[in-house]
Amino acid sequence: MRSIEKKPLPLISPLGRGAIRLLNHLGALSIFLVKSFFMIFQPKQLPLIIEQVYSIGARSAMIVALVGLFTGMVLGLQLFYTLVKFGSAGVLGSAVALSLVRELGPVLTAIMVTARAGSAMAAEIGSQRISEQIDALATMRIDPLRYLVSPRIAASMISFPLLTALFDIIGIIGGYITGVMLLGVNSGAYFYRVRSSVEMEDITSGFVKAVAFSVIVSTVCCFQGYFTHMQKDAYGAKAVGLSTTSAVVLSCVLILVGDYVVTSLLL
Amino acid sequence: MEQPLIEFRGVTKRFNNHTVLDQVDLQIYEGEVATIVGKSGSGKSVLLKHIVGLLQPDKGAILFGGKSIYKMGKKEWNRYISGVSYMFQNNALFDSMTVFDNIALPLRQTTNLDRKAIEERVRLRLEQMELGEVEKKYPSELSGGMQKRVALSRALATDPKIVLFDEPTTGQDMIRRNAILSMIADYQKRFGFTAILISHDVPDVFFISSRILALSEGKIIFQGTPEEFETLQHPFQHEFVQSLEELQEHLTGIYSKRNFKVRYQKILSRERPQESFVAGLFTLDNFEGICKLLGHTTGQMVLESLGRYINKHFGAVGGFSARQSRSEFSIILPFSYLSEAEQILRDFSMELQEEGLRIIQTEARIYRDICFEFAILAGLAGGEFGAKEIDRIMDDARENQREVARVYCGERR
């Protein structure tokens, strides 16, 4: 009987390995999210969640407001000159508000919070991992997912929509500053357009996105920090650095991918 | 036969291709202080982490009360793990929390105690560990020794039944090392937990250990009492224990028990049989009371100072001394008769009462406003080289002990 030699196929094997790795990773991420999510409802979680709402939400408010203001101002500026070409500068309020509420608000808020709080989540949990603090929690019968991860996910789900709302309001004020105060659009027309064009559906879709991004950012950042010790070819502080970088990059990419998916589902 | 509380049966653990634990069999019994000794990197911490489930064996089983811990249901596992505490080698303190919060964390998260009860328990631990002044500080603001004590306080906060100490004395000076060991022994006695220690502090750790387990090249090569370990005929004994004991001798200035015996054997081989000598045993009475009231560090300071004082006095008349147990010192006066030695002891007693105790109190930083009565007991026994085992002569000396000096509080009675 002829023996069949098993030779690795040059192109298929690496692809297959990559696909298995990706599936493994996604599987681990999903289990991590589901377990952490259900732990939100366990006792003794409320003080931890409030603490994280302060850290993720309240402490990000300033930077979100600042970015919102300038985003609104730039939008007001750009859209004014575009709309003037079509003789419809009067609808500036609608253009600014809809852009902010539907797209820019949730996306830019999520990216800003990722940069400020998401990186901190990954770095903090990562350094707790390498200094055995997470092992210490486990030996004290404190589930690290319950104590470290689930309050961050819950706090993100509370904070992201609120920060998005703040971003939208400040952005609309930013558009008002450039459109009305600097470029001479009628003030009443600006706010009338904002009120008449923005519908509840737009606000809801913005909030749905904000919640989706909050889950993506908090899960990815906590996951990267939690498994810092499994980074390839990096240990200690270097591993924490790598985890933080990959948490931020992956979160930003997933925010944009998620934005497309959620938008296409909602429209 | 007594059932072990924790038992390893053929436990093997590999990391990549490196076998760290190789078919390890060991037994830990309830209420004992079991010390695991071994060279760095021999897998002691890995062994300990298996007990709390941080690592799982590739082969073999770990039994608790006869049942595999990996076959326990969730409730059973929770019950088991809630009785186990682990003190990490690098302390693993939460650096973003104050000392108080670090100790309170397991109580807040795993018990239903109210705020006041938690506060009381934490403050009690802080007091016991002499950490009262640093409760609002963060771990990074503390010295290495203090961080160790915070970690120890946290490990004991929930009154566990089994406490695992992963090198609790690393990076400590001699006094602190002995204070921590003394503290462990004291708490173990008071609360009755089973202590499993990893330590390099030979021979100091022997004074508090009921059993020694020696780990070498991934295998348990010895399990038994400290006395049995001292007579172990194995290359490990020579390489590991001797080198550490020599270092110990430089640190304390007096002989370790083992070197004391070696010196005794040397004299024995030089002298003619029937040449007489006198052995003496000094005990710091109520040592545990000193530790309880003035702290373990002060207790160790008193002990160290007393040891130095005895060594100085009897060394001047040709004797040599050693630490016999936690609170005992032994001396040998070669070529002496009991009557001569009694006179030397009387002189020593007077000197100790008149100025020695004051020196000891000053060196141990016991200030005048704090007074604690304690006594020093001494007993002598005559012997002839070759006639009796030294341990039996020491037992005779112990039987002959009487009070030779005392610190009085208030008026002298």
Image: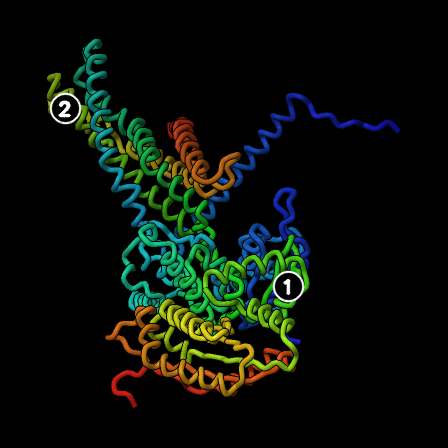
Q: Secondary structure at mark 2?
A: helix
- Tell whether B352 sits left or right of A8: left
Q: Chain of mark 1?
A: B
Residue B381 in which image quadrant: bottom right
Residue A81 in which image quadrant: top left
Residue B117 visible to the viewer: no
Q: Position of residue A178 (x, y in %)?
A: 15, 21
**Mark drawn on residue A177:** 2
Q: Say what amino acid the circle numbered 2 marks.
A: Ile
Outermost residue toward the bottom? Answer: B413
Residue B33 visible to the viewer: yes
Q: Mark 1 highlights which residue?
A: B26
Q: Say what amino acid the circle numbered 1 marks.
A: Leu
Q: Position of residue A230 (x, y in %)?
A: 51, 40
In the image, residue B269 above or below residue B170: below
Q: Residue at x 34, y 42 (%)?
A: A157
Q: Nearer the viewer, residue B342 or B254?
A: B342
Q: Residue at x 60, y 68 (%)?
A: B262
In the image, residue A194 above or below residue B363: above
**Mark 1 Cα-neighbour bin, 10 Å: few <14, some 14–19, many ≥20:** some
Q: Nearer the viewer, residue B274 or B398?
A: B274
Outermost residue toward the top? Answer: A85
Q: Position of residue A5 (x, y in %)?
A: 78, 27
- Tell whether A252 sits left or right of A14: left
State how far apart marks 1 and 2 are (Cα): 77 Å
In the image, residue A194 above or below residue B225: above
Locate the N terminus of chain A by quadrant.
Answer: top right
Q: Are marks 1 and 2 in contact (CB under 8 Å)?
A: no
